[in-house]
Amino acid sequence: MIAANPTDLEVYLFHEGRLYQSYELFGAHVIRGGGAVGTRFCVWAPHAREVRLVGSFNDWNGANSSLTKVNDEGVWTIVVPENLEGHLYKYEIITPDGRVLLKADPYAFYSELRPHTASIVYDLKGYEWNDSSWQRKKRRKRIYDQPMVIYELHFGSWKKKPDGRFYTYREMADELIPYVLERGFTHIELLPLVEHPLDRSWGYQGTGYYSVTSRYGTPHDFMYFVDRCHQAGLGVIIDWVPGHFCKDAHGLYMFDGAPTYEYANEKDRENYVWGTANFDLGKPEVRSFLISNALFWLEYYHVDGFRVDAVANMLYWPNNDRLYENPYAVEFLRQLNEAVFAYDPNVWMIAEDSTDWPRVTAPTYDGGLGFNYKWNMGWMNDMLKYMETPPHERKYAHNQVSFSLLYAYSENFILPFSHDEVVHGKKSLLNKMPGSYEEKFAQLRLLYGYMMAHPGKKLLFMGSEFAQFDEWKFAEELDWVLFDFELHRKMDEYVKQLIACYKRYKPFYELDHDPRGFEWIDVHNAEQSIFSFIRRGKKEGDVLVIVCNFTNQAYDDYKVGVPLLAPYREVLNSDAAEFGGSGHVNGKRLPAFSEPFHGKPYHVRMTIPPFGISILRPVQKRGERKQNEEEVHRHVIGRRARKPASLADEKHRETSRAVWGEVPDH
């Protein structure tokens, strides 16, 4: 039971920045005891001269509802002797200079539907969860060596009702979950669902960090949605924005007439690009607020992780000509990750960081920021730039494909093709591809295939699975009408089979974060823009050979070095007719010849598809796998991998030797 008054320990920890369940102290709580019932309100307003409670229960007149100031640091509280569940309320704050502000509760659990802005007294308890099986399985798995393909979506524009209304959380459980499961995704990632006033902000400019947005239903409705995802075997990740917040009058901005949640210095406070205010991450009370918020979503909504937005904006002071480290942000992020992993070590803490800040995914005790994953923005930018290059010029941009392997193991990476890449005039992924209509589809299939074969977990934004042609339009649903067109249907089928292939073969994911899991076969063929490489699993001899051709020229009888003396079977080819391709496939098993090539002890002769990826798997009898691996080790022992001349940084030497392989035998 929540006490009528804050305890001394709660208040102390809050001002120390270590009250990680501050939502139990602040906000509106119905309390019971001694046969009586009441509703306690508590708020932090350190600069306020007076704080009054106004709402639907007192005709919005706070004359007789003043809060009591608990301490000099600005904690205020009041107990109303009745159950106010369902009532609207705000805080009427009198500033030191006599102004009157009407503010929503920073810790409110539920809020009015926009454009209205009042908080709502809501009891989060009472929902009966049915995801115990999911929670048990999650505790048993090591996330690093498991397959992961995330489906990122914006809740309000994935699909809409015929009259344009949103689907509710409960309705979306019926609509979305079967669709995502059919395509094989393992997780969904939701753009921010905190309460926010403006639809076009997509939730990234929040006002109610503890209020799941009322656009789609109640908090219990969202619990039902997450519960259904878990029962179906889908993880749920949410976008979370601890760096900056919305400046609307009813929100956190200048909460009590002076900087409270934001930095006092204007240069540090104002985020001029986004029109928001930056959280003061050095203030202990703000840390209590934000870290508690992360734990709140874990405890009450059972989410499985967070994609932490705009980490770069936190790590460096804004509005400076040069990059200056923000030590408060560094300390906050470390404290955040330590608190989250102490609560649940299996949470996904994903940094959306576009900088080269070192050791983002290293543990805090080893000098890292403490995340367990980071978006690989460098890989994404390089690959999209490469794919937008005319095919006949790609030989001059060859290193844009190979460069990512120089740092692929410096962090635990997720490869993202996210909403940021298909909005604001950037065009859809399909429309970024050069060439004819059919060539656009072929190159997109190739790009998806290369993403699945590259080390790292995967993320696709909604609509990418069926090659949405227009860029994302947040005010409209996806262009579902495209399923009436053959190539879009075939792209959807390709994505299903590609994800199934990825999940079926362990070399694609078991050693995602270990250099032993990747080896180039031929990285030097810039003239033909063909790349070939090996992905390895944990078991000896568990290998896949991948060949990617980034031009429209097909090749027959093409020699590729392979690691094992065994027949090879093509398990996926993006140029297959069933996917809309031209049919340059390897329909029969490919024998391996006992002649070294590409620095490997054997080779195969194969068909190389135009704008295509071919994935080969050795067919081995029992006992052959270990014998073959031993032969490979004998063949390569004592040989030193040659490092490209462009590699100068000493810290990359070990990784370079592991992944770059031998010079090809041209």
Image: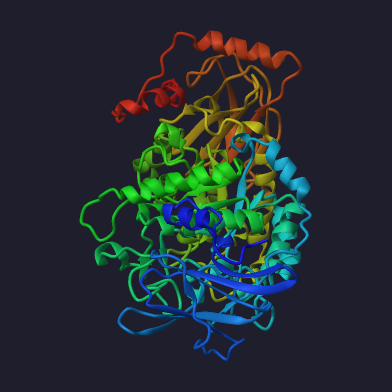
Quarter assignment of residue 167: bottom right
Q: Nearer the viewer, residue 84 or 500?
A: 84
Residue beneath the point at 72% across and 59% down: 177
Q: Residue furthest front?
A: 34
Residue beneath the point at 54% across and 62% down: 6
Residue beneath the point at 66% across and 29% down: 617
Query: What is the image's colouring?
Result: rainbow
Q: Can you say whether 218 is above or below 528 in the image?
A: below
Residue 84 located left or right of residue 476:
right
Instruction: Classify the position of the N terminus by image quarter.
Output: bottom right
User: In x, y percent, where is residue 226?
Assistant: 69, 59
User: In x, y percent, where is residue 89?
Assistant: 56, 81
Residue 422 located left or right of residue 496:
left
**Count of numbered circles on the image:** 0
Q: Nearer the viewer, residue 659 or 289?
A: 289
Q: Can you say whether 535 is above or below 229 in the image?
A: above
Quarter assignment of residue 160: bottom right
| Residue 440 visible in this rendered orientation of the protein | no
